[in-house]
């Protein structure tokens, strides 16, 4: 069964059920009302007659019965019977039927009045007088029943109408939902057919469908960004590996063609160095994608970020000195515990240091600082070199992003990208800022990144 | 003095190349080509060193290593692996290996590590005088003081650690990566010659003014401290 029809039927059924409940309630109330009114009237009438007998005796009773027959409304039944249950007076064509017809008190039964061909349902009261005679008073439900019948038929019509209306509403609703979903399905279909630019149309109503569509669109945006990144990465990987591979190839070729053993050895040494550089590039690319995929969080542990930075500063100090820069560490004023991957962060910090030494040594001074903040630790490496203009900083963070192709010999342009990926692994950020002059690179890392994810 | 080495490696080419090289160095090499066979051979504990490939058929390298360590066989294990990321290296070391070497590697690098591991084992069974001497160089690990020809050398803490590591591997090649891992305890590959700069600083303090240098550069491999 198609979903549209199922929704329509369900809506129709629900409408029917709710109406049925209302109708049932009305029916029960009106029926009860009609019966209890008649019952009150009959009991009242019986009481009046017995009062008349008590105060005025037999003659007064006979008169009262006559009066009732003459002036009472046509639904009223009354009869006086002798102790042998033979009729003395009254308008009853027969003794009202029912189980145990001569039980004293109130009962329901079929009443046939004189001049009537069919008996009618009604309420009766039997009373036995002190002289052994019986007074039977009653009333036909007529009016109440007629009202009930009208009510019943109109309620029935109402029920049918409600059912049809429900079905109709259901159909419209189902079609509306179907249409909105079809729009989303269509987009999904076109995306499956490799058109990632498709987006779910939004009505602007801000309803649940719009929210769903918005979510799907946001997801698609993220996917296309990732796809684009992946494409760029594959492109640049293919492109950037070309030059080291061709250098390697020409060194190998030259070695093969050389007849001088000393030169040959030198060339082969160069081949090995080129191959090592290639392997290093591949390892970095692997490390970046692993970090971006948040692999390695199981190796997180507590350590002191300040201590690690101090150690790395000490490690790079001779290298900086050789390049003519003084590398200095600004010791933090308190301990800087950090929950993270010590080895990978060591790599990230060393990448920042190498970057600063490589490009910023001319400025003379490189500083490393660790600053504990409320919920994060900021590790800064700042130099006094040429810096990176603001509009080029994003490029500097990109994998294989290089600001100046002429220095492509040194480093593969992966250092900052890897540092950034490692920052992401820690739910942190790598920021490039202006050091007025020079470049300031900062890793801002939550003290306990696991808690945030 | 040859040693018994168990080589567990499924790649025939690599295995043949390593076995040949190690045999030429005077070691006797036994080979296994899958993890289960390797584990079976290793359990008799008669080897001086196990070279274990990480990705093996039947039973992978780390499982072999865990099983060995669980059986209290403490033969030194050198893991070889194509899994090069820092996380993979740490996984390998945390499983109880003594060293982790990423493929591809040079034979010189492997040999240096093999020798260092064998040497460590030797040192363990032979607790001699705690002082280390290399020629006229004298190192006291307890007071961390260093003398050359009776003259005290003023070394920074890291320079001392570097020298002590060299001295403990006297006469053997020590590679840059070994220094980075063992002296600094870092497991990433710096793209620069940061280690070389430290070694040349140490060399200036150690050899300057002395006729005979102690700290030698071994081309294409690393460094060696030898009298």
Image (cartoon, rainbow, N blue to C red):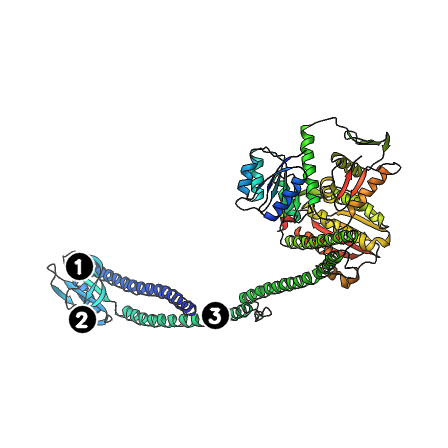
Residue at figure coordinates x 68%, y 30% from the top left:
B124
Q: CA distance from mark 2 to mark 3?
A: 59 Å
Res A139 quadrant in image: bottom left
Pointer 1 residue: A99
Name the chain letter of the residue that bears numbered label 3. Answer: A
Image side of residue A164 versus residue B1, left or right: left
Q: CA distance from mark 2 to mark 1?
A: 19 Å
Secondary structure type for disc 2 = loop
Q: Residue B95: where, in percent of width, then height? A: 61, 40
Query: Where residue A379 sits: x, y (%)?
Result: 75, 49
Residue A412 seen from this side: no
Q: Residue at x 23, y 71 (%)?
A: A74
The crowding category of the residue bearing disc 2, from other C-alpha atoms within 10 Å (few below 14, some 14 to 19, many at least 20), is few
Q: Quadrant of the N terminus of chain A?
A: bottom left
Percent position of residue A317, x then y = 81, 46
Residue ranking furthest to the front: A259
Q: Disc 2 or 3, which lies upstream in sequence?
A: 2
- A438 vs A446, left or right, is right
Task: Decide if residue A247 is in sight here.
Answer: yes
Q: Residue at x 70, y 55 (%)?
A: A278
Q: Are marks 3 and 1 on the same chain?
A: yes
Neighbor class of circle 1 (other Cα within 10 Å; few <14, some 14-19, many 20+) is few
Q: Secondary structure at mark 1?
A: loop
Q: Residues within 10 Å of mark 3 (few under 14, many from 20)?
A: some
In space, the residues marked 3 and 1 are separated at their CA atoms by 62 Å
Is tag 3's residue or tag 1's residue first in the polypeptide sequence?
1
Vertical relation: A296 (above or below) B214: below
Asked if labels 2 and 3 share a chain, the reply is: yes
Picture layout, residue B12 above or below residue B72: below
Mark drawn on residue A118: 2
Between A403 and B14, the one lying in front of the other is B14
Q: Choose mark 2 or mark 3, whichever is in front.
A: 3
């Amino acid at each position: 069964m198609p979903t549209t029809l199922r929704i329509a039927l369900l809506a129709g059924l629900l409408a029917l059920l709710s109406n049925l409940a209302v109708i049932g309630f009305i029916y029960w109330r009106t029926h009860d009302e009609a019966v209890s009114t008649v019952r009150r009237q009959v009991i009242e009438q019986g009481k009046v007659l017995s009062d008349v007998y008590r105060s005025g005796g037999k003659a007064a009773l006979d008169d009262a019965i006559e009066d009732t027959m003459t002036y009472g409304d046509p639904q009223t039944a009354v009869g006086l019977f002798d102790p042998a249950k033979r009729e003395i007076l009254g308008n009853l064509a027969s003794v009202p039927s029912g189980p145990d017809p001569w039980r004293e008190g109130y009962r329901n039964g079929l009443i046939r009045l004189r001049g009537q061909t069919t008996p009618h349902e009604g309420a009766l009261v039997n009373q036995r007088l002190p002289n052994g005679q019986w007074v039977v008073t009653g009333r036909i439900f007529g009016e109440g029943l007629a009202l009930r019948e009208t009510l019943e038929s109109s309620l029935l019509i109402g029920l049918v109408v409600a059912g049809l209306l429900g079905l109709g509403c259901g159909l419209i609703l189902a079609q509306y939902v179907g249409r909105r979903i079809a729009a989303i399905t269509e987009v999904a279909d076109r995306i499956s057919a490799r058109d990632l630019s498709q987006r779910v149309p939004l009505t602007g109503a801000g309803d649940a469908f719009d929210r769903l569509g918005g979510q799907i669109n946001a997801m698609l945006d993220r996917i296309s960004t990732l796809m684009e990144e992946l494409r760029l990465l594959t492109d640049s990987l293919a492109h950037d590996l070309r030059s080291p591979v061709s250098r390697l190839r020409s060194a190998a070729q030259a070695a093969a063609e050389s007849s001088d053993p000393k030169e040959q050895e030198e060339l082969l040494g160069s081949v090995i160095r080129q191959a090592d550089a290639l392997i290093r590039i591949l390892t970095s690319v692997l490390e970046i994608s692993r970090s971006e995929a948040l692999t390695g969080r199981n190796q997180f542990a507590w350590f002191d970020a300040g201590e690690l930075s101090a150690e790395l500063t000490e490690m790079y100090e001779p290298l900086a000195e050789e390049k003519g820069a003084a590398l200095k560490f600004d010791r933090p004023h308190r301990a800087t515990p950090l929950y993270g991957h010590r080895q990978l962060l060591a790599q990230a910090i060393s990448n920042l240091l190498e970057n600063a030494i490589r490009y910023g040594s001319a400025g003379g001074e490189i500083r490393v600082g660790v600053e504990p903040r409320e919920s994060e630790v900021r590790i800064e490496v700042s130099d006094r070199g040429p810096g990176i203009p603001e509009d080029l900083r994003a490029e500097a963070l990109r994998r294989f992003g290089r600001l100046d192709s002429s220095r492509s010999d040194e480093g593969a342009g992966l250092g900052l990208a890897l540092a950034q990926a490692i920052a992401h692994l820690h739910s942190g950020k790598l920021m490039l800022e202006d050091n007025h002059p020079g470049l300031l690179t900062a890793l801002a890392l939550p003290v306990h990144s696991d808690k945030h994810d | 003095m040859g040693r018994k080495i168990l080589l567990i490696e499924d790649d025939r080419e690599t295995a043949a190349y390593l076995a040949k090289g190690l045999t030429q160095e005077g070691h006797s090499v036994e080979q296994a080509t899958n993890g289960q066979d390797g584990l079976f051979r290793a359990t008799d504990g008669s080897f001086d060193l196990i070279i274990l490939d990480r990705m093996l058929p039947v039973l992978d390298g780390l499982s072999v290593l865990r099983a060995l360590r669980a059986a209290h066989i403490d033969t030194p294990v050198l893991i070889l692996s194509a899994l090069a990321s820092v996380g993979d290296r740490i996984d390998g070391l945390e499983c109880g290996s003594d060293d982790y070497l990423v493929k591809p590697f040079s034979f010189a690098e492997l040999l240096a590590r093999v020798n260092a591991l064998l040497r460590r084992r030797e040192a363990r069974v032979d607790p001699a005088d705690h002082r280390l001497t290399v020629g006229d160089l004298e190192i006291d690990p307890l007071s961390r003081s260093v003398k050359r020809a009776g003259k005290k050398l003023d070394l920074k803490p890291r320079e001392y650690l570097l020298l002590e590591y060299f001295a403990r591997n006297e006469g053997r090649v020590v590679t840059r990566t070994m220094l980075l891992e063992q002296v600094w305890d870092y497991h990433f590959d710096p793209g620069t010659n940061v280690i070389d700069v430290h070694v040349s600083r140490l060399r200036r303090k150690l050899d300057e003014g002395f006729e005979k240098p102690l700290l030698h550069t071994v081309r294409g491999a690393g460094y060696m401290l030898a009298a």
